[in-house]
Amino acid sequence: MSTIPASHSIAAPAATAQRELHSLYRRVPHLGDYGSMTAIEERWILPKARAYEASAPAFGSAGELLRALEEYLAEEEASLPESATFLAEHATRAQFEVVVRQFALDGLTESESLLPVVPRLPYRSAMAVFRVLIDELGCGNEEKAHSQLYRDLLTELGLSLRLDDYLDETTPECFAYVNMFHWLASRAPSPQYFLGAYAYFETSVLYAFQSFARAARRLGIVHDAYYTEHLYIDAYHSSHMRTAIRALDEPDLAKIWAGVRLASDIVGTATEAAVARARETVA
């Protein structure tokens, strides 16, 4: 996961743009909205994607890329930022609540924005991804859907279940976290960016969420299933995402690797920003 320091956070004009983009992604756009979306994406995520694609190693096969992904993840896990230790071992309940609030825009709608990627993928790859999304949505069981698990957590903490109640406080980095998933599924010029990003994400969660789960357990939070469920199920999801990549007849390995790096960058920066906000605003 990227460990970009807080001083490199998204600047003020871009912060406003991230909130605007989130609003645009949540509605059926008219012609002017499409122009606004494209302009923001051209300033924000497309340059990152292109840069990571241009600098991707010259992989000889999907198997070679997946081995590089394993090495990349192992390096991240071995060098987790100090913020992970702070959250796991030192954050107060109030500080933990701030972090939970920062990711509420994602938790309350988890995986809903990902569904459009399925028809964009070749059939065998799409079915592997769809198996992951079915789990994310609780296999049709509302109580097991990951978004419901987040609602359970919010309810225990006495926090709102209304998405709009979090718009004014969410950091631009956490807006970007939510916007990234929508872009990958619906807006990216190739769905292969999504495959790399989600293959990274479903595996990195296995160590990245450890600090959240440990904090919840230490603080006596009962409804911690949002974190513990990910630590259980995402090992299977990681396997499915690797299958989705191997199933491609014509993989664009540079785009897949760009997705890996893009997700690492944006997810890591959002997590750092959320913990920094908790430290700054709560004594």
Image (tube, grey):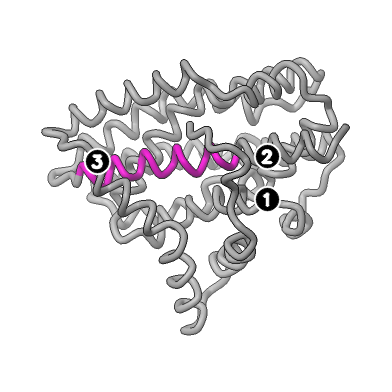
Q: Earlier in the sequence, mark 2 or mark 3?
A: 3
Could you tell me residue 101's position as x and y percent? 74, 43
Q: Quadrant of residue 187?
A: bottom left
Q: Residue at label 2?
A: 274
Tags 1 and 2 in contact by the CB under 8 Å rule?
A: yes
Q: Residues within 10 Å of mark 3 (few under 14, many from 20)?
A: some
Q: Amino acid at mark 3?
A: Ala
Q: Residues within 10 Å of mark 2 (few under 14, many from 20)?
A: many
Secondary element at image label 3: loop
Find out whether residue 42 is within the magenta segment.
Answer: no
Secondary element at image label 2: helix
Q: Earlier in the sequence, mark 1 or mark 2?
A: 1
Q: Amino acid at mark 1?
A: Thr
Front-most of residues 25 and 273:
273
Q: Residue at label 3?
A: 56
Q: Is residue 4 rendered to the left or right of residue 165?
A: left
Residue under the point 61% across and 65% down: 13
Q: Which residues are magenta?
A: 253-270
Question: How far is the residue under mark 1 from the one under mark 2?
Answer: 7 Å
Find out whether residue 259 is within the magenta segment.
Answer: yes
Vertical placement of 20 versus 262: above or below? below
Q: Residue at label 1?
A: 171
Vertical placement of 225 versus 52: above or below? above
Tags 2 and 3 in contact by the CB under 8 Å rule?
A: no
Q: Main secondary structure of the magenta part?
A: helix
